[in-house]
Amino acid sequence: MNKKHQKTLHAIFSNPVQSNILWHDIEALFMACGAHRTEGNGSRVNFILNEVRAVFHRPHPQKETDKGAVKSVRKFLLSAEIVPFPN
């Protein structure tokens, strides 16, 4: 995981919840952690990470992820036992 992925991971777990995290950065983080991605119908994207499955909707037309989606991403990462390293 490179510094950009670590920065994204810290942004996901920061409080208060951020709403300006780019979806592309979240997907890149998932892939860097070893996730398997498959495309679903429409804007759906399926991920499997450490045997944990999640389905997300890519935001459109904006590029940023909303707060509700960031909370879902947090839950997915916690379930997959991915947490930020202390600074």
Image (tube, grey):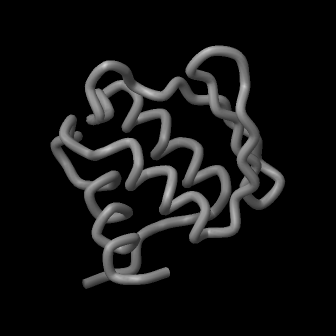
- Residue 19, located in which quarter of the rendered image? top left
The number of callouts visible is 0
Spot occupied by residue 47 in the image (x, y as percentages of width and height): 70, 44
* Viewer-proximal residue among 16 and 32: 32
- In the image: residue 13, left or right of residue 76: left
Asked if 39 appears above or below 48 in the picture, the reply is above
- Residue 53, located in which quarter of the rendered image? top right
- Residue 8, located in which quarter of the rendered image? bottom left
In the image, farthest residue toward the top:
42
Residue sitting at x 76%, y 48%? 48
In the image, farthest residue toward the right:
51
Query: In the picture, which quadrant includes the C terminus?
Result: bottom left
- In the image: residue 41, left or right of residue 19: right
Asked if 19 appears above or below 50 in the picture, the reply is above
- In the image: residue 17, left or right of residue 74: left
Residue sitting at x 62%, y 15%? 42
Spot occupied by residue 51 in the image (x, y as percentages of width and height): 83, 54
Spot occupied by residue 7 in the image (x, y as percentages of width and height): 28, 70
Spot occupied by residue 43 in the image (x, y as percentages of width and height): 56, 21
Residue sitting at x 42%, y 83%? 2
